[in-house]
Every structure is written in structure tokens, then in C-alpha cells.
Amino acid sequence: MGAAPSVNLASETEMTEDPTHTAAGGPGARAPLTRERIVEAAVRLMDEEGLAAVTMRRVGRAVGVEAMSLYHHVRDKDDLLDGVVDHVMRGFPFPAEPGPSSEDLAAYGRAVAHAWRRTLRAHPAVVELLARRGRSARSAALLRPVEVALWTLRRMGLSPPDAARAFHVIGSYVMGSVVLETGRISAAEGGGGATGHDLPPDAFPQVLEALSYLDADDPDERFDFGLDLMIEAIRTLAGRSREPERDVGTSNATR
Amino acid sequence: MGAAPSVNLASETEMTEDPTHTAAGGPGARAPLTRERIVEAAVRLMDEEGLAAVTMRRVGRAVGVEAMSLYHHVRDKDDLLDGVVDHVMRGFPFPAEPGPSSEDLAAYGRAVAHAWRRTLRAHPAVVELLARRGRSARSAALLRPVEVALWTLRRMGLSPPDAARAFHVIGSYVMGSVVLETGRISAAEGGGGATGHDLPPDAFPQVLEALSYLDADDPDERFDFGLDLMIEAIRTLAGRSREPERDVGTSNATR
DNA sequence: GCTGCCGCCCGTACAGTGTAAGCGTACAGC
DNA sequence: GCTGTACGCTTACACTGTACGGGCGGCAGC
């Protein structure tokens, strides 16, 4: 966790926030209650109890304040959620700069994809937030990793339109795998097949068999399986795109 | 009071489903209000105004009934949403049976992926529902397309564990692409950059350029670009898997 | 006919949501 | 001292899901 709050004191969520106005009589304000503290509390709540638990009143309680007091630091709830996305993306673990060789760049691309995956899996609910707001939540913290990913694809030899396409493909894959996996997880812990109708045992044999394999597999290896596939394809595509020797970056858009 | 629905609201309403108490001479009950009608109204509401608009009261109004009356046909709201997923998946457009050749099977696989994509894009909110409930919503209507997809992969020559993996990869891609695209769409129609801070013009040049390409591209072609990539990879994987003397262990086949 | 009965629908009520409006108070500058 | 301002609190309103109880209509038995 790159941007982990060093304070880390709490260990207790809900009520631990003390009055705090007893502290120093100095010029300091009384227990700041900054926007950042609010956002951090919201992130914690989201990670621990899901997006539905992120409620103005719950967040307020977590920072020791009434709900309406939050509105002095966030415009409304959407603004708070934008702050949550921003805060999470500010923790994006950028990999170390790559070398110039094709293998280095491929490895770097893999590392960037892993960083995305790690970030999203650490806070699965942000996927829902990203899907919900789509384009409106475009903070610098969110765009920087996108920029790096696109830059990497260009460096691997893709033309601008191909880089955009490749980013969309890989991004979709990363996003979707997080959706599928965390959906699975939350359902697994959710209470042991509550709804009732278990699947009939003999219909859907393929599904039954596949489920056992999916459960047995390591999700990370499964993810790499698909990722390697795409990176390999990108390298061939790049090679084709670079055909006219030095001339990088022009045309060759449509295959 | 209860006997006079003619005076009843009817004013604005959602869309005034149907009169329900026409004629009334026959032996018929008074417009059954079956679970199916409720689910259909919920789907319509979800498609037109988003998942947040699916409210017991709103659904009730759409079928001409008070909210509490719905509870005689659905256990609770989650049950209703399960019904929504079920109803949508029952509309899955199964492609025609394939021939036995490898090309036919590949084309069939493509068609199945397209059917998934079409179904999800027609009702984008079900992605959120699937992600939220994950495993608990496993009706026959949902599992049948999964079974077909797995069956197709097996037919293409994949071993059971490879078929499971490939399904996960392609499924993630389909899911993710729908998330990205519909997120984009809903944001585009959502009100013209409401939040405020537009991105600084010169930072993130790659992002800016990529956005223009992504907007210009046809989403379906972009989707096919990634899909073909995966199907091609599957065919090689299948060929390798079916060849006994060639050891499958090359780095990404079996791990 | 009448009398129960029972499935369906409604009205009311309660806890919880986001947030608009106004009040109280502690500190800054004078 | 006084005053303006920033911040937190209280109250209030329109919503949400749903527990509870009551009423109305069509049925079986007689």
C-alpha cells in the first residue's frame, strides 16, 4: 500500500474519535477534520463493508462528527466518492522505469497491468464507482496511470490508434477479471448459498466441472494466462506496425 | 376507499401499464399481477432510468399497485433483482448450431461472445447486478449460456481446465468492455462535464490523443479486435493440447 | 341464501438515506 | 472589548425497504 495512512492508529473504526479539543491550547485548529480524513474514512468503510455502507452518517460517525458537518468539506456525496477514487488511484504502485529493449518493455507493460489489477483488487468497489461515473471522474491521480499505460504501448511500437485499441482491450480485461473475481469472493463469504435453489446436479455438467477448476486455480496465474496472451499479440502487432524501419508512429492504423 | 381505482392516481404515473379492470364481466380475476409482470416493469425501469430508479414504490406504480403488494410475488428486493437477471438472460440469443470444422467452431465461439455482449449491452445494469451477487444468482437462464460457451471451448479442443481458464479470460473481457463502454456512454449523456475540473490540456497528451481515437472508432470493431485475438490464441492452444507428442508444458499451457 | 375462509391488496409505521436551512459557538482581526 | 467568519450541530423533508395489521373479493361447505 503505497499511500497507506501512516497514522494508522485507529484499529477501531466507528466511535474511537475522541473529542480532541482538549489538546494543545496553541494556535492549532481543533482536530482539523480535513477532507482527506473524511475520504480516508470513506475508503476504509468501503473496503470493509462495501459501497453500500458508505453513508454520510456512517462516515461522519467514523470521523467523530455529525453527517451534515461533512458538507463543509465535500460538495455532496458524489464529490466524496470522486475523492475516494482519487485517493485510491493516488496509491497506484508505479513500476520502475523500463530499459529500452523489447523484452524490458513487455515486462514493464505486464507490470503496469499488474499494478492496475492490484490497485483495483485492493479496493474492489472502485470498479463500480468507475463504471458508474465513467468519464466524469477524471482526476490527475486517475489519468496518470492511464497515461503511463498508453505511453508504454507506444514505446512497444504501436501506432496511436492501435495503442488506444490495445489499451481498451487490456483495460477491459483487467476490469472484467476484477469484477468476476471479487463478485465470486463476496458471494462466497456471503453466507453459503442462501437463496435457495441450488443448481440441479446433472444439468450444466460443464459449468460444474469448470467451477471446480476455477476454484482450484490460482487467480493470479489465471490472470497472467490471459495477460500474456494479449501482450504477445501486441508484440506481433507492433512488429507489423514497425515494418517500414525507423518510421514510428505514422499510419498503419487499420489492419 | 379501496374499491375505487378509477379515481385512483393514474395522473402522472410511469406509463400506465394497462387498465387491468376492463370489462370485468368474465370469470377472470382482476388483472393477475404476476411475478413476471413485476419483473418486466423492473427491467424496463432499469433500462430507462438506471438501477437506482428500480424502487419498490416505482415498480409498484409502474404496474398500478402499491409497493407492499409486490411482496406477495417477490420475497424481497433482492429476489426481484434476481428475477431481473433471470428475465434478461432468458432473452439470450443462442446462435445456430455450428458445423464440426474448426472454422465453424471458431465462428460459433465468436457468435456466442457476441450474444453475451449484445445481451449485456442491451441491459447494462445487469453487469452491476452480476458483479454484486456474483455466485448467488445462478438461475438456469443464466447458466445455460455459460454451459454453451464452455461446451464450445471443449469442442474447440481445449481440455477441461483450459476451457475453464479460457472462459474466464473471455468472460472477463466481455464483461469489462461492457463496463467501460456503458460507463462512457452514460457519462457522455450525463450532462456535459458537470463536475467541473476539465483535464489540463497539455498534461496527459497520450490520454487526450487516445480519447479521440476511442471516440472515433466503432465499438463493435474494437471489441472484435480483442476477441479475434483471444480466439486465435485459443485455437493455437487447442492445437497444442491435442497434439500428444508436443508437450503442453510450455510456460502458459498448464500451470 | 349465508358463513366461514383465504389469497390478494392497501395503509400505516419505522428505521435509515441524502441534503437544504438555520442556529450556536470558538477563534481571527481590529 | 467587539464583530465577522468558519465550522459543527440540529431540525426537517422527501425518499428508501419492509414489518404489521386490516379490509375486500371470490371460494367451499351447508
Image (cartoon, coloured by chain):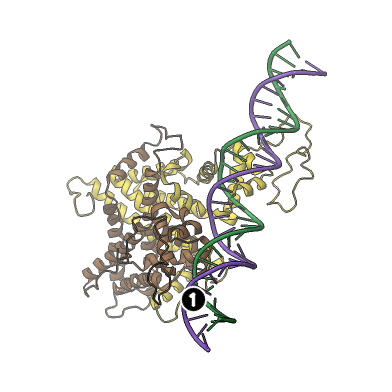
Chain colours: A brown, B yellow, C purple, D green
Residue A117 pos. (x, y %): 33, 60
Residue A163 pos. (x, y %): 36, 70
Looking at the image, residue B31 lies above or below residue B245: above
Image quadrant holding the C terminus of chain A, namely bottom left
Q: Nearer the viewer, residue A188 or B25?
A: A188
Q: Is residue A11 left or right of residue A85?
A: left
Q: Secondary structure at mark 1?
A: loop
Q: Nearer the viewer, residue A142 or B184?
A: A142
Q: Nearer the viewer, residue B240 or A157?
A: A157
Q: Is residue B233 left or right of residue D27?
A: left
Residue B213 pos. (x, y %): 44, 72
Can the viewer see residue B99?
Answer: no
Q: Nearer the viewer, residue A146 or B181?
A: A146
Report the amino acid beneath label 1: Asp
Q: Which residue: 20% across, 55% down?
A: B251
Q: Which residue: 53% across, 63% down?
A: A68
Q: Is residue A106 left or right of residue A59?
A: left
| Residue named by callout 1 | B198
